[in-house]
């Protein structure tokens, strides 16, 4: 069966990952919704046959725009990037179409009578495989699930959409900037992360020193952030999902909620004094030891090597 796919993400990097998968499934039969002319340009040059440019980024405009393109292109599959915005948008689109929906998927395959998708379940401890029947199937896709397309310089067509938002029923009374800026954890190549093994806030100095030697970002488990307030953002299923080349978990026990956020890391190193801690099971390298002796020793060794 020839599959037609429509893709959308306001994040250009993620929209390219969706495009890579869409081309794999649909060849040239891929349409896209873009949020600005630059993104539209990238997508038409990367293999999308038709790129529809939305009038603005509001949820209603995007929802209306995607529904309009669904009417025009009649796709079998709608792939939406699982950003905060995408997670709000995709189920609304699916509801309006009375279509099957699955969120935060990392795999999508064409089946005999629909699409088969995979997503993590039970806090990331297992993989749920689901079938979506009917047309179109609406799927939101987690970042870094698919590769960007290899093709470059292929010219598709950019088309302006005329859909605008109805007058909003929401009145914004005040906007405040976030207290802490983006920690950059999601794109970090190296992360050193603190757990409740740290006894006092000041002891995070040990982690800071290691981070400085490695050029790493600092993360933590949820209690260190949400309960103790020592850091702005935590890593895990309810925090940031990360995929660094190196993740060093220091004094972290490795519950499924934390593990679900680090499973895409290339190499995981654990430092935990408890030999039976779960974190050792999901680590590539385990150090059974006290962070208060291991961290200074590691930092010292790195400094000496750098000399
Ligand atoms: C709905 C829900 C969502 C959640 N989401 C998240 C999430 O996204 N991310 C997250 O992290 N948690 C999350 N949690 C919390 C999670 O269940 C755990 O409570 C939490 O991950 C434990 O954090 P920890 O490993 O730092 O602490 P602990 O489990 O207390 O582990 C501390 C570890 O440090 C070790 N240790 C102690 N002293 C030392 C020392 N001197 N040297 C070396 N090791 C030492 C201990 O052996 C122990 O293994 C969630 C919970 C719920 C209910």
Image (cartoon, helix red, strand yellow):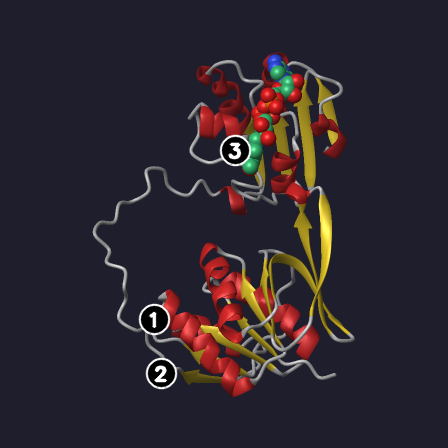
Dividing the picture into quadrants, the one containing residue 305 is top right
Q: Which residue lies furthest to the left in this view?
A: 173
Q: Earlier in the sequence, mark 2 or mark 1?
A: 1
Picture layout, residue 237 above or below residue 200: below
The residue that label 3 is drawn on is 219
Placement of the C terminus among the 4 image quadrants: top right
Assess disc 1: are there few (<14), some (14-19) or many (≥20) residues with their C-alpha within 10 Å of its C-alpha: some
The answer for how far apart the CA atoms under marks 2 and 1 are is 10 Å
The residue that label 1 is drawn on is 56
Residue 240 x %, y %: 52, 42
Q: Earlier in the sequence, mark 2 or mark 3?
A: 2
Q: Which of 273 and 6 is in front in this view?
A: 6
The answer for how far apart the CA atoms under marks 1 and 3 are is 34 Å
Q: Quadrant of ligand 1?
A: top right
Picture layout, residue 238 above or below residue 164: above
Picture layout, residue 85 above or below residue 52: above
Picture layout, residue 176 above or below residue 296: below
Q: Which of 80 and 204 is in front in this view?
A: 80
Dividing the picture into quadrants, the one containing residue 274 is top right
The answer for how far apart the CA atoms under marks 2 and 3 are is 43 Å
Q: Which of marks 1 and 3 is in front?
A: 1
Under circle 2, the secondary element is: loop
Under circle 1, the secondary element is: loop
Under circle 3, the secondary element is: strand
Q: Which mark is residue 162?
A: 2
Q: Which of marks 2 and 3 is in front?
A: 2
- Residue at 61% over, 43% down: 244
């Amino acid at each position: 069966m020839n599959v037609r796919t429509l893709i959308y993400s306001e994040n250009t990097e993620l929209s390219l990952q969706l495009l890579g998968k869409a081309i794999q499934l649909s060849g040239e039969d891929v349409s896209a919704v873009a949020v600005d002319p630059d993104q539209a340009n990238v997508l038409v040059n990367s293999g999308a046959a038709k790129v529809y440019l939305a009038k603005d980024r509001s949820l209603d405009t995007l929802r209306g725009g995607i529904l309009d393109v669904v009417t025009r292109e009649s796709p079998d599959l709608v792939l939406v990037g699982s950003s905060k915005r995408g997670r709000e948008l995709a189920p609304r689109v699916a509801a309006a179409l009375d279509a099957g929906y699955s969120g935060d998927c990392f795999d999508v395959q064409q089946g005999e009578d629909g699409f088969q998708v995979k997503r993590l379940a039970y806090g990331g401890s297992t993989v749920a495989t689901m079938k979506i029947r009917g047309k179109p199937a609406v799927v939101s896709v987690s970042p870094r699930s698919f590769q960007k397309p290899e093709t470059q310089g292929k010219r598709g067509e950019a088309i302006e959409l005329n859909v605008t938002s109805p007058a909003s029923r929401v009145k914004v009374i005040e906007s405040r900037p976030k207290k802490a800026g983006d920690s950059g954890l999601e794109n970090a190549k190296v992360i050193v992360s603190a757990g409740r093994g740290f006894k006092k806030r000041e002891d995070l100095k040990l982690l800071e020193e290691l981070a400085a030697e490695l050029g790493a970002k600092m993360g933590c488990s949820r209690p260190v952030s949400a309960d103790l307030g020592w850091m702005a953002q935590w890593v895990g299923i309810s925090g940031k999902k990360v995929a660094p080349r190196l993740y060093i978990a220091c004094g972290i026990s490795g519950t499924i909620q934390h593990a679900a956020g680090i499973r895409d890391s290339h190499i995981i190193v654990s430092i935990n004094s408890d030999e039976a801690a779960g974190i050792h099971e999901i680590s590539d390298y385990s150090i059974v030891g006290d962070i208060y002796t291991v961290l200074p020793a590691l930092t010292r060794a790195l400094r000496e090597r750098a000399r």
